[in-house]
Amino acid sequence: NAGVTQTPKFQVLKTGQSMTLQCAQDMNHEYMSWYRQDPGMGLRLIHYSVGAGITDQGEVPNGYNVSRSTTEDFPLRLLSAAPSQTSVYFCASSSLLDRGIGNTIYFGEGSWLTVV
Amino acid sequence: GNSVTQMEGPVTLSEEAFLTINCTYTATGYPSLFWYVQYPGEGLQLLLKATKADDKGSNKGFEATYRKETTSFHLEKGSVQVSDSAVYFCALSDLGAGGTSYGKLTFGQGTILTVHP
């Protein structure tokens, strides 16, 4: 009953450090994505992937890298952390099996990141 | 581009009160519409969805009707409980190439709901 698993749940970084947020799903979903949640702004899409080896930018991609070497995993890398990247990060996945509109998107429990 | 606007919160209600959280959207295509709920310290859970005009999504006593003419998807519940205290997000998913949404959602800013006994 794992679904979408994110690690770590909490992390404090110093400005300029790099780190990777891990995301794994066990539902064989083709699509995976990363969002950040900031107060009063809802969730905003950072990067997404429609399958292994394919990634694309979302609304706020700057300062983040992603890769998709397997169907299961979609890590998010912060290259040089900045205080503006203090946020809650959510990984999500969904399947093509619903054949189009309305396919349910499943979210992980979130990663709380603070950059000091 | 696509956008979602939710009523500003926070919303504070007494138990058994009627709840409405307004949501309107702007989209270039024919979006699917969703309500997600986030309980304290947890991730987002899908509450309900509607995929075409006049569809009504419902779950756990919550309802929302897809109104194309008013571009709205307001969330309602007839009698709220303390356990409904959470943040509620309205979202839309637009169709990409091939008629799939590619897991890309556009969210509203969220509405904090607090229900007192």
Image (cartoon, rainbow, N blue to C red):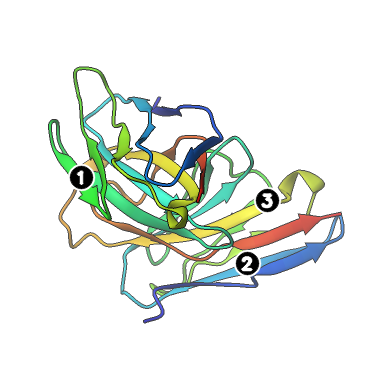
Q: Secondary structure at mark 3?
A: strand
Question: Which mark is on residue A87?
Answer: 3
- Visible residue check, residue B100: no
Between circles 1 and 3, the one closer to the viewer is 1
Q: Residue at x 38, y 47 (%)?
A: B80
Q: Residue at x 77, y 63 (%)?
A: A18
Quarter of the figure with the N terminus of chain B: top left
Label located before the other in sequence (2 or 3)? 2
Mark 3: few/some/many CA within 10 Å (<14, 14-19, 20+): some
The amino acid type found where label 3 is placed reads Ser
The amino acid type found where label 1 is placed reads Gly
Mark 1: few/some/many CA within 10 Å (<14, 14-19, 20+): many
Q: Is residue B4 left or right of residue B43?
A: left
Residue labelled with disc 2: A21
Residue labelled with disc 1: B57
Residue B22 sits in quarter: top left
Mark 2: few/some/many CA within 10 Å (<14, 14-19, 20+): many
